[in-house]
Image (tube, rainbow, N blue to C red):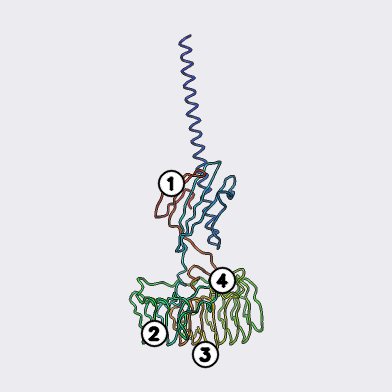
Amino acid sequence: MVMVALVLVAMGGLSLSVLAVTNSSNDTLRETRERTSAMYVAEAAISQSLFDLQNGGTGVVGSEQAPASYEQSDMWVDVTDMGGGSKSLVATGMDKGVGYRIEVLVDQEVNTNFIWAAFGDVGMTMDSNARVDSYDSSLGVYEDQDVNGNGTKKYALENGNVGSNQDISMDSNTSVHGDASPGPAGTASITGSAVVSGSTTPSSETLPLDPLDIPVFPSSGDYIASGTTTLPSGDYDFDLFELDGNSKLIIVGPATIVVDDMSLSSNAELIIDATAGGVEFFVMDDFVMNSNTLIASTTYTPADVTINLESDNVIDPDTSVDLDAVDFDSNAKLYGTIYAPNASVEINSNFELFGALTAYKVHLDSNSKIHYDEALANANANASTAYTMSLWRGAPYQSGSTSAWVSSSSTPKQTPDGY
């Protein structure tokens, strides 16, 4: 009986031990499962934060005091501006009291088509008294920032950089308030009293011009505007797009307009209502702005108007690309961006461009002016802002804790859900 009792006691102890191990194992498995779930919730929070950033938001999702819900779990994202277009996104996911925290460092991608006031692939030339400077449309209109210098030499800011993959030539009395950067094997030829406030050091590499990706829409024939008319938001394809003299056309954005030939007769105004979005043009052949014409949004924000020229007047000289302001008092103006990878673009005398110009070749006639909008470096009228990830790290998290990260890297790490 004694032996039986001892065996029973031993078996009972063993059973208790097995039960304790089993319970501990179950607790560990449950915590691991909940920790993994919390990590996925944190990943979902990062995705939501990025989506918000790319569409103009702050990227903040909920808060620790008022978390956002994700199925049966909680999540929040804190965003810190690191400067230079970089942001730190710290996401926390909580599942049944178990947490996981992820930090992602993202860098805003710059639209390289419009980091220059003017850029000519095979050359950039400026005639006497042509002038380039910069301003920031996010701070107000150009006239309020044009406070430096005096007389005909007044300017706003000094980030009006010009560039080329080859040579830059500046005649006497021209001024560039910024850098004048030729290509790696190019030179910057500065004549007489021409002034460059920044560097003339050649670029270390060439800047390739991307081909245009032209959308395809059903043709709607010709569009000729006279008097004051309004074109509703939408996608259009016109053979001829023409504004008669003294006419005013209001286009409601967002809109994408593909045309074979586009022209504005003297004194015509093309106004963009960009309250809901900007307007983007794709011009296949001729593009002509005559004297006293205006293209601008109602807020005069250059990012609201994008003009893409597929026009090839280099191979086909019959194609006309002309920004024309013959009369010195004409004050023809365009608030927007021009991208013409196949065209030689000439900015004629007394024409003012507020925005940016990138073309196959650029020539600025006497007394023409380009005022680069610094806000364009991080904006594109009809596209969301893009971000790239430069760091990912994650660690278990307990509410109220400030525990160290468990992994860190200067290069991205792929998380389990393929983020």
Relative height, residue 390 to residue 126 (above, below): above
Which residue bears the numbered disc 1? 404
Q: As shown in the figure, which amino acid type bears the numbered disc 2?
A: Ala
Camera-near label (3 vs 4) is 3
Asked whether the beta carbons under mark 3 and mark 1 sit within 8 Å of each other, the answer is no
Q: In 3D space, how far apart are the residues under numbered discs 3 and 1 (Cα atoms)?
A: 66 Å
Can you tell which mark lies on residue 194? 2
Residue 74: give its label.
none
Q: Nearer the viewer, mark 3 or mark 1?
A: 1
Residue type at mark 3 is: Phe
Q: Are marks 3 and 4 in contact (CB under 8 Å)?
A: no
Distance (Cα) linking label 3 and label 2: 21 Å
* Dot in front, 1 or 4: 1
Closer to the chain start, of discs 1 and 2, is 2
Q: How would you rate the neighbour count of disc 4 (Cα within 10 Å): few for under 14, some for 14-19, many for 20 or more?
A: few
Question: Element at badge 2?
Answer: loop
Disc 3 versus disc 2: nearer the observer: 2
Residue 216, disc: 4
